[in-house]
Structure formats: structure tokens, C-alpha cells
Image: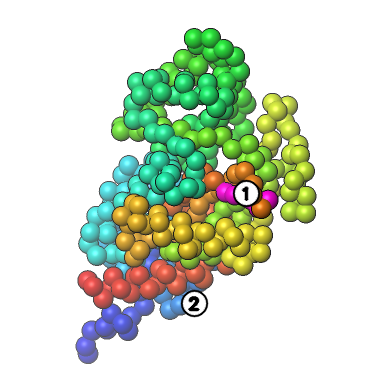
Amino acid sequence: MGQTSVTERKPRIAIVWRGDAQARAAARADNNRLAPVFEALAALGAAPEPAVYDEAFEDQVRHQLMSADGVLVWVDPISGGKDRSRLDPLLRQVADAGVWVSAHPGVILKMGAKSVLHETQGLGWCGDVRRYASPEALAAAFPARLRVDRRRVLKQNRGNGGLGVWKVELVGEGDDPPVRVHHQHGDAEPEVLPLAAFLDRCGAYFADGGMLIDQPFFPRVYEGMVRCYMSEGELVGFSEHLPRGATPERPDDPPPMTVSGEPMSATKIMYGADEPAFAALRARMEREWAPALLSRLSIDPAALPALWDADFVRGPKDADGADTFALCEINVSAVYPFPPTAPAKLAAAAVRRTQAAMTAR
């Protein structure tokens, strides 16, 4: 009997997420948060399989991924005190062997790090952004910018869930003025301290080639955030993160405040790609910003992730009274949750790319 040809066999697509040995042993297609992705892949004739990852059994995962045809990855840059410093080289090795990997670590470094705001600010979607590659550069330039704008946002280059993202507000004067800083991770409370002391604290973000990104503060952030979900270059859905107590019918209501005076975001609403309220944003993402992003970062369209998202806050209204939007970050490493419209689209992209990789091997 002859061997089964590439076009006749089901593409094996491993789905990677972080977990311990017990989670790896128990993982099935239907007992995890990515079950809709498994279902969508199977519906298209693929053979998806769980590939729970941890550094403790890295060799097992490497062997599994090397024998797969495609790999989809959901692993945060930082989670539970662990990062991707060992996973990314593994994924590069797998991709170099001819296995399709989404998202490829090289693409993550270009798209999914906060430095994308600096690299693409000429697209007109994120305001005046600066990049600091050392503590000395931060100390030399940031105070003057803060004195002009009074409020700025500093972001470490790689992180998730608000880790290393600081709202910095000038609240006094002098050579070393007091600033109110608010770490956007978890339930951290704002604190007031001298600017020099805060900048010293930021020194840790420059370790191992790290950097800080300096972006304007957009006051309408308190009206909520809009997330555009993309599969390759196609928009496949939206979500809106509203302040607690706000509803889609009352988006302009003043947000309730915590005792610290900061609004708390608690409500997330999913929308399909055809949501009328975001039609203009969809048009700009698909027709203007996503193509320009590829060009600016020298990314092959075939390398775009099967699923990624871009987070926006509302900027000043334009001359016609319509909302403008400012990019906060792009997420590539572990996009979740996602709209119910997303799995079918990302599965179609994954199967198509995997089959192309199988043919090329």
C-alpha cells in the first residue's frame, strides 16, 4: 500500500497553552477554554490536539510539536512569574523545521511588543510616542515631557494584563516634583512619590534589553476600550470594555469611581464584525492600518497570526463629531477571550496555512 499523501491526511494542529503536568495529562479537546477552537478545526477536517506546556517537561512538548503540522499558541508573555524565554526558542526551532507556527515569536516581537507604538506612530493611530532604551534616556527626557503634558503613560515593552503599565500624573512643582502613579495591573492603588524615586523604580524594566514606551494619556479612556479582533488581515469581531455601571445604552454616563478616584472596568461586551457602531473603525483597520502595519514592520502577509487583536481608546472627536481612536497595544501571544465569531475564521486560516506548510515540507 502506498503512503497517504499530504492532501489526503488530516493536518495535525497542536494547540499550546501553559499548565502543569497534571493539566497536560488531563487535557482534552473539550475540557478547556479553547474548546471552540478545537471544534472549529475539527469541523474543517483538521486533527487538533492539546499541547500543554511547561518548562519542566519542555522536551515532551518539543517532540510533540516537531511531529505536528501546525501549531497555535496561547501563552502570555508573563504569567505566574514565568515568561516565554524558553518557549520562544522552542517555537522558532519548530518553525525552522517546517511546521507552521502562529504566532511566530519573530512576529510577536514586531507586533505584540509595546514598541510597535513607536515604530508605527506615523500611521496616525497612537499619538506622539517616545521610546527609552536606558534609565539614563528616561531620566533625561521624560520629566520635561511630563511637565508639558501633566499626564503621560509609561509601558514596559513586553507584558500583559497591565503589568508594567503606569499612568503618571504631575501633582506638584520643583526640581523633583511629586507625581501620582497608578500601576494598571490588578487592583493596585495610586500612590504619590517624588518623580526621581519613581524613575528609579522603573530601572528594572530595562533588564535584558528591555525598554519603556512613553505615550500620551487619553482622557476618554474612562469611557472604555474597544478591542478589534483580527484573523490575518480580516476583522472578525469586537469587544467593548465598559466602566462598571455603564451600559451600551449609556456609554457617556460618568463612570463610577473607587475610593482612589479611578474608574473600575468590569463589563466586557462582545460584538460581531458587522457591528454598526464600529463600522468606521473596521474600515480603517482592514483598509488602512493593518496593511500599513505590515509595510512599516516588513511583515509578510502570510506571517500574520491566525488571531490577534488591537486595543483602542477613544481620542478627541473629529470635526463631524465622530469618535477617533488611539491604539494602546496589540496582543498576539494569547488572545482570550474572543467573540463567538472568531473560532471559525481563525480555524480556516490555520488549516489553510498548515496545509501550505505541509505541501512545502
Circle 1 SS class: loop
Would residue 122 be found to the left or right of residue 165 on screen? left
- Is the C terminus in the top left, top right, bottom left or bottom right quadrant? bottom left
Q: In this view, does 138 lie above or below 193?
A: below
Tell whether position 209 is magenta.
no
| Neighbourhood count class around disc 1 (C-alpha, 10 Å): few under 14, some 14–19, many 20 upward | few
Which residue appears at 52% of the width and 32% of the height? 153
Q: Which mark is residue 318?
A: 1
Location of residue 277 with respect to 353 vertically, above or below = above
Of badges 1 and 2, nearer the viewer stands: 1
**Which labelled disc corresponds to residue 167?**
none
Q: Residue at x 61, y 62 (%)?
A: 279
Stretch in magenta: 321-325
The x and y percentages for residue 17 are 44, 53
Give residue 207's position: percent from left, percent from top.
34, 29
- Write down the residue under mark 2: 43
- Give the image quarter of residue 138: top left
> Does residue 325 appear to the left or right of 298 in the view shown?
right
Q: Looking at numbered disc 1 in the image, what kind of residue is underneath it?
A: Asp
Can residue 26 be seen from the camera position used here? no
Q: How crowded is mark 2: few (under 14 residues within 10 Å), some or many (20 or more)?
A: few
Query: SS class of the residue under badge 2?
Result: helix
Q: Which residue is drawn at the image coordinates 26% and 83% (left, top)?
A: 5
Q: In this view, does 227 lie above or below 177?
A: below
The quarter of the displayed image where residue 233 is located: bottom left
Colour scheme shown: rainbow
- The answer to whether residue 298 is visible is yes
Q: Position of residue 36 (x, y in %)?
A: 54, 66
Q: What residue type is labelled 2?
A: Ala
Q: Which residue is drawn at 46% across and 69% down?
A: 347
Residue nearest the viewer, comparing 297 with 210: 297
Name the outermost residue toward the bottom.
1
